Image: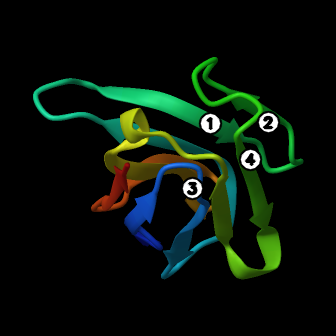
Amino acid sequence: VHVEESGGGLVQAGGSLRLSCVASGSIYRVNAVEWYRQFPGQERDLVARVTRDGETNYADSVKGRFSVSRDNAKNTVYLQMNNVKVEDSAVYYCKGEIQPHRNYEFEYWGQGTQVTVSL
């Protein structure tokens, strides 16, 4: 199983960016997926979570600006980032709760994608 983020880059404050998280390999089911971000020298913080059924939760700092969605047929989860702020600059990671087999579930992390917001 492999998890990979994409879509990071440089964006101006107030702009938008969409990150993607794709799970591939021998997968029975992708369950909940979470987006985290990590600032230099700090721990990873939870940004958003989406269950397989589409229930979502957000950190207070991104509520109303970020939106998480998923396409189960493509094993893909998206993080739509609107009205971004300089303080949103971080490395963004996704973590998938994935069943490679129906009897097992593991957590898989991607390698991260850098988001940089400029003034």
The residue indicated by pointer 1 is: 48
Q: Quadrant of the N terminus?
A: bottom left
Q: Which residue lies furthest to the front in this view?
A: 119
Q: In which quarter of the image is residue 71?
A: bottom right
Amino acid type shown at disc 1 = Ala
Earlier residue among tags 2 and 3: 2
Q: Nearer the viewer, residue 48 or 54?
A: 48
**Mark toward the start of the polypeptide (1 vs 4):** 1
Q: Residue at x 86, y 38 (%)?
A: 55
| Labelled disc at residue 56 | 2
The numbered mark at residue 105 is none
Q: Name which residue type carries label 3.
A: Ile
Please report contact status of discs 1 and 2: CB closer than 8 Å, yes or no.
yes
Q: Do the residues labelled 3 and 4 touch (CB within 8 Å)?
A: no
Q: Residue at x 77, y 56 (%)?
A: 69
Tell me: residue 101, above or below residue 64. Answer: below
**Disc marking residue 98:** 3
Q: Residues within 10 Å of mark 1 (few under 14, many from 20)?
A: many
Residue 42 found in image quarter: top left
Q: What element carries label 1?
A: strand
Sequence-first tag of 3 and 4: 4
In the image, taking residue 9 as reference, residue 105 lies left or right, namely right
Query: In the image, residue 4 lies at what x, y percent?
Result: 41, 71
Q: How far apart are marks 3 and 4 (CA)?
A: 21 Å
Residue 67's disc is: 4
Q: Nearer the viewer, mark 1 or mark 3?
A: 1
**Residues at discs 1 and 3 in contact (Cβ within 8 Å):** no
Q: What element carries label 2?
A: strand
Q: Total of numbered circles in the picture?
A: 4
Q: Do the residues labelled 2 and 4 touch (CB within 8 Å)?
A: yes
